[in-house]
């Protein structure tokens, strides 16, 4: 993974030295996703809200659904409330993403893939997964 720190710093104002800049969490994860794009690594940022009965039931249902699909490692990571899941396989990442969307009302997820975030990342991930399934 190569990275040029100068890419992060915006142009200086009035020729002043660029000593600081600000970035967001989204910038960091999108950058990681872009750096890993040649390997088609998908990043799912998991969002677990404060714990209540509904969240526990939703989390349990998701873990059970993933286990039914033989995704035991992923189900364990989600049961442990991992914040980031990285997938080398777009097909598996897409499947987990859709399981979260279908089986979990209380757990959220943000998708980062090939330098994209949100809906654009999800569409590209699904397209790559579809292409791999057809091979």
Image (cartoon, rainbow, N blue to C red):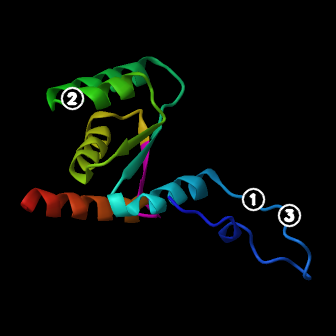
Above or below, 4 against 14 in this view is above
Q: Nearer the viewer, residue 135 or 65?
A: 135
- Residue 19: x and y in percent read 86, 63
Numbered range of the magenta stretch: 109-117
| Residue at the extreme top of the image, as rendered | 53
Residue tagged 1: 22
Above or below, 131 against 17 in this view is above
Q: Residue 65 carries which label?
A: 2
Q: Is residue 70 left or right of residue 78?
A: left
Q: Residue 19 carries which label?
A: 3
**What is the CA distance from the residue labelled 1 to the residue labelled 2?**
40 Å
**What is the CA distance from the residue labelled 2 to the residue labelled 3?**
49 Å
| Residue at the extreme front of the image, as rendered | 2
**What is the CA distance from the residue labelled 3 to the residue labelled 1?**
11 Å
- Residue 59: x and y in percent read 36, 25
The label nearer to you, 1 versus 2, is: 1
- Is 105 colored magenta in this rendering? no
**Quadrant assignment, res 61:** top left
């Amino acid at each position: 993974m190569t990275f040029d720190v100068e890419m992060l710093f915006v142009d200086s104002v009035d020729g002043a030295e660029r000593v600081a800049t600000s970035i967001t969490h989204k910038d960091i994860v999108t950058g990681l996703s872009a750096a890993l794009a040649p390997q088609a690594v998908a990043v799912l940022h998991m969002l677990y809200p404060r714990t209540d009965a509904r969240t526990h039931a939703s989390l349990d249902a998701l873990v059970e659904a993933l286990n039914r699909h033989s995704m035991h490692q992923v189900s364990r990571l989600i049961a442990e409330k991992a914040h980031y899941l990285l997938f080398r396989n777009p097909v598996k990442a897409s499947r987990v993403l859709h399981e979260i969307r279908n089986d979990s009302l209380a757990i959220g997820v943000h998708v980062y893939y090939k330098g994209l975030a949100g809906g654009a990342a999800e569409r590209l991930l699904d397209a790559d997964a579809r292409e791999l399934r057809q091979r």
